[in-house]
Image: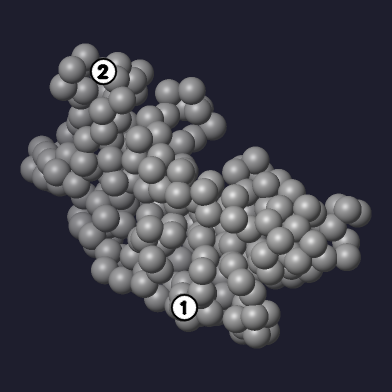
Amino acid sequence: MLKDYKEQIQDADLVLVGIGHELRAERFIDFKEVIQDKGYQKLIDREDEDGKWMRSVYERAYLLELGQVSYFKQLEEVLDGKDYFVITSNDDGLLYHTSLDKNRVVAPCGTGDFFQCETPCDQQLYPAKLGLDDLIAYYEETGKIDYLECPKCGKPLIFNVRTQGNVSSYVENAYISTWAEYTKWLQNTLNKKIFILELGEGFYLPDLFRWPFEKIAFYNKKATMVRVHETMYQFGEELKDKGISEKIDSREFIK
């Protein structure tokens, strides 16, 4: 459990945390339970593309309106007062609804806060909330599912989140400045006592932080790395002496 590593975290000069797919929003939130709008309830069993799209509209709107959540409370407590950075491969924005320093959290896959042109015709991002509210109001009034259009080229607007299908067209503007701060922070980790905590990533996007974390741990002689995952918790031979595997669902680990 996370509390078992509190002393090591407190003793470290730096703490690097990766938040992965085991800790995505739908593993904490039962959207069917919390979104009571009649329009959403009608969509629950629809598996066509229109139904999936409209469900995602309701769910994104709910996530944007969240207050502070308690899902990461223990992590917040052990990081309090530490020099840390948190990177996540999730695109739900949950970490921005915690007491973590928002300048020390980077979400390279997006947060759902913006729309972008599907193509894209340019690098413009559009705040999502107004568009989501309009889509929901139109659907609940007419029963019809609509889409938003790019005001410049007329093609569909999509959520500004990175998926396997849009890697080449994903607009990175929303996170790029924080990513620069993250890479600058990483440059100062060499020869520092660093505690690396990888939570629930598996092989969802291993090039984002699973493999980079391993590289940091390998070259930094003062590094300790803990990998938490229910099934993909293993380390290679090169890290067997400094990598600690925790075979447990990350949700249980951070409780």
Callout 2: 10 Å neighbours few (<14), some, many (20+)? Answer: some
Whether residue 45 is visible to the viewer of this picture, yes or no, is no
**Location of residue 225 in the rendering, given as x and y in whole percent from the top left corner:** 72, 64
Up-down relation of residue 249 to residue 119 (above or below): below
> Which disc is residue 81 wearing?
1
In the foreground, 142 or 127: 127
Q: Quadrant of the C terminus?
A: bottom right
Up-down relation of residue 50 to residue 33 (above or below): above
**Location of residue 125 in the rendering, given as x and y in whole percent from the top left corner:** 26, 33
Q: How many numbered discs sit on the rendered protein?
A: 2
Up-down relation of residue 58 to residue 67 (above or below): above
Q: Residue at x 76, y 66 (%)?
A: 222
Q: Label 1 is placed on what type of residue?
A: Gly
Picture quadrant where residue 144 is located: top left
Q: Residue at x 71, y 46 (%)?
A: 211
**Location of residue 223 in the rendering, given as x and y in whole percent from the top left corner:** 73, 64
**Location of residue 249 in the rendering, given as x and y in whole percent from the top left corner:** 65, 67
**Which residue in the structure is indicated by mark 2?**
155
Q: How far apart, in angstroms, are the residues tagged by discs 2 and 1?
A: 46 Å
Q: In the shown orientation, is residue 246 left or right of residue 54? A: right
Q: Residue at x 79, y 62 (%)?
A: 221
